[in-house]
Image: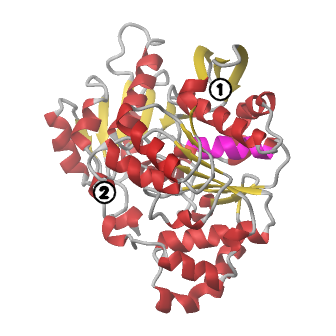
């Protein structure tokens, strides 16, 4: 598993997924799809587009990765994870192929998603890439629309160490005469996407050139915006149950993507899409994106795990702390853990120096040991104690924090997933 051991688990190329899907009767050819890649924001964007399609009445499949607690989170139909019986049945049906094909864990999950969507006869499926795009196992589909969210420096040892190189891998999802929506204009990637789209005889649209978002206010449950269509000079009132400043960029991407789908004949009016954004979490099951769990004290879960993600996270923290009284030094408690292949020094430097830290590690081989993370943090003038498990770190923070404080859990999907399991007494699957 790449999730556990890193790049050694990757099976490069599409041969394995093609063999698996051929044996299953090519389920990915039985439904239209929207394909989504990007460094940051692709998970939220995938869920929002799926939510808009569900709201419009379409039976919608959604494939995302990784999961937080239960493997079935990766494969949803109208927001509901596939059943345990379906997973068991899929394993039993395909196990005879494993010795011959030697598939990766990710390839099996992708094949399972395609099989589930075909069996459920979905009207459409939203498919999120796992890593990169060009050689990602999901890239055997020919979607009706390709979407690429923000590009940042992550998985550089696999995808390349510049934004241009990473963009080339993400651009691999662009297909012949299939329109593509780019979430964010970045000078380093603009030419890459333009040339790729030109070579595939298709159009490329930049969401941030079409939409502006102005935040009006935020409460415990919603963010409120004015969404402005630049070309039409129209303004819409919009609210979303997804919190965090980074969602404004994702919403632009969703609005632009759904407009293209509407032009293709899908029943996705701007008013309907905006209405769907009020209940993304309930509709699709999205978790871990600036998710606030009320209590004394409140706990915020966020899966930010690279410098770009941490930059957005830091902006959210700054906005939150503006609501605090003057003395805020002891009010923020950060439980964090990272995997080894991230730019940890840069990520830590973006977090507040005056927070109280609880360094920990997830139960995966890639995890940086808590004591090593503690030492790395000290170089960035971030101090705190090390805890061998997320459960112990959570207990320590909750023991010290007063009801008015905030506890933030961040650094990786694995840390947040283990925190959810502890908080909700769940078992990992």
- Give the residue at mark 1: 221
Q: Is residue 336 a member of the stretch shown in magenta?
A: no
Residue 101 visible somewhere in the drawing: yes
Marks 1 and 2 sit apart, C-alpha to C-alpha, by 32 Å
In percent of the image, x 40 and y 73: which residue is there? Answer: 11
Q: Which mark is residue 367?
A: 2
Left or right placement of residue 132 versus residue 280 in this view: left
Quadrant of image for the N terminus = bottom left
Choose between 104 and 372: the one closer to the eye: 104
Q: Position of residue 241 (x, y in %)?
A: 66, 31
Residue 294 visible somewhere in the drawing: no
Left or right placement of residue 103 versus residue 60 in this view: left
Quadrant of image for the C terminus = bottom right
Q: Is residue 50 a member of the stretch shown in magenta?
A: yes
Q: Residues within 10 Å of mark 2 (few under 14, many from 20)?
A: many
The part of the chain drawn in magenta is 44-54
Q: Which mark is residue 129?
A: none
């Amino acid at each position: 598993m790449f999730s556990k051991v890193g790049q050694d688990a990757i099976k490069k190329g599409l041969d394995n997924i093609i063999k698996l899907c051929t044996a299953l009767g090519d389920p990915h050819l039985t439904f239209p799809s929207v394909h989504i890649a990007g460094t940051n924001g692709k998970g939220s964007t995938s869920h929002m587009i799926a939510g808009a399609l569900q709201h419009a009445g379409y039976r919608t499949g959604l494939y995302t990765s990784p999961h937080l607690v239960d493997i079935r989170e990766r494969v949803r139909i109208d927001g509901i994870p596939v059943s345990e019986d379906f997973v068991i049945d899929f394993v039993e049906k395909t196990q005879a192929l494993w010795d011959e094909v030697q598939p990766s864990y990710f390839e099996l999950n992708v094949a399972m998603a395609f099989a589930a969507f075909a069996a459920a006869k979905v009207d459409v499926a939203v498919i999120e890439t796992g890593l990169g795009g060009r050689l990602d196992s999901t890239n055997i589909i020919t979607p009706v629309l390709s979407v690429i969210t923000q590009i940042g420096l992550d998985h550089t040892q696999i995808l390349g160490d510049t934004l241009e190189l990473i963009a080339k891998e993400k651009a691999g999802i662009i297909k012949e005469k299939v329109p593509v929506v780019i979430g964010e204009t970045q000078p380093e990637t603009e030419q890459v996407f333009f040339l790729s789209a030109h070579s595939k005889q298709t159009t490329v649209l930049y969401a941030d050139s079409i939409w502006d978002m102005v935040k009006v206010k935020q409460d415990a449950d919603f963010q409120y915006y004015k969404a402005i269509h630049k070309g039409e000079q129209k303004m819409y009132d919009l609210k979303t149950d997804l919190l965090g400043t980074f969602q404004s960029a994702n919403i632009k991407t969703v609005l632009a993507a759904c407009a293209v789908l509407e032009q293709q004949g899908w029943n996705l009016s701007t008013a309907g899409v905006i209405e769907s954004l009020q209940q993304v979490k309930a509709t699709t099951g999205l978790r871990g994106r600036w998710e606030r769990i009320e209590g004394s004290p409140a706990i915020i879960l966020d899966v930010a795990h690279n410098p770009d993600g941490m930059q957005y996270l830091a902006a959210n923290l700054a906005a939150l702390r503006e609501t605090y009284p003057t003395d805020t030094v002891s009010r923020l408690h950060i439980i964090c853990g990272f995997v080894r292949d991230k730019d940890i020094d840069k990520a830590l430097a973006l977090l507040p120096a005056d927070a109280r830290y609880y360094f920990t590690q997830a139960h995966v081989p890639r995890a940086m040991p808590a004591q090593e993370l503690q030492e790395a943090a000290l170089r960035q003038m971030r101090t705190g104690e090390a805890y061998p498990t997320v459960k112990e770190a959570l207990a320590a923070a909750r023991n010290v924090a007063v009801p008015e404080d905030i506890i933030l859990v961040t650094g990786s999907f694995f840390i947040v997933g283990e925190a959810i399991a502890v908080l909700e007494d769940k078992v990992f699957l």
